[in-house]
Image: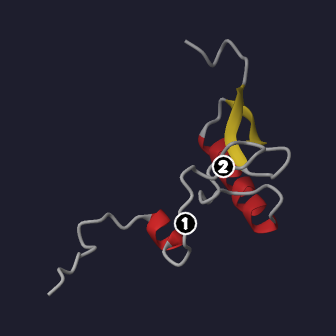
Amino acid sequence: MPKFKAKTNKPLDRDYFKYRDRPKKKEDVQLTPCCGIDVDHIDLNVKNKEDWEIIEDHIEEKLRMYSDTESIIPVSCKKCGRLLTYSSKLINKKSLWR
């Protein structure tokens, strides 16, 4: 009688479910050619209207919370529009700084 090899000791990650129906698993991580972020990573996109509203709400909230911040710039990829980071400009008044 042949032994059954259980798959329970094998980690079930994203790649397992992504490639279980495909014959060959890709060895390298798929990155976007423009900004080098993993394709599977879900980010906000400045080209998407709903995401842009979320970005605006976040910036508005931070400007209200931090009075020493003059402006906040959402930095995104120019090609695909993925939000990469935020850049803040502080108010340059000596009376605010100790």
As helix, strand or loop, the secondary structure at mark 2 comes to loop
Residue 97, image x, y percentages: 60, 15
Residue 42, image x, y percentages: 62, 60
- Residue for point 58% across, 50% down: 29
Circle 2 is placed at which residue position? 31
Splitting the image into 4 quarters, where does residue 67 fall?
top right
Residue 39, image x, y percentages: 65, 56
What label does residue 3 carry, if any? none
Along the horizontal axis of the image, is 47 left or right of 70?
Answer: right
Along the horizontal axis of the image, is 67 left or right of 79?
Answer: left
Q: Relative to 69, say whether 79 is above or below.
A: below
Quarter of the figure with the C terminus: top right
Render colour scheme = secondary structure
**Few, some or many residues within 10 Å of mark 2 (<14, 14–19, 20+):** few
Marks 1 and 2, the one that precedes in the sequence: 1
Q: Relative to 13, say whether 17 is above or below.
A: below
Circle 1 is placed at which residue position? 24
Splitting the image into 4 quarters, where does residue 78 fall?
top right
Instruction: Report, in whole angstroms, how far the alpha carbon at label 1 lies from the one at label 2.
Output: 18 Å
**Few, some or many residues within 10 Å of mark 1 (<14, 14–19, 20+):** few
Mark 1 belongs to which amino acid? Lys
Q: Relative to 71, say whether 91 is above or below.
A: above
- Residue for point 57% across, 58% down: 26
Of residues 45 and 71, the one nearer the viewer is 45
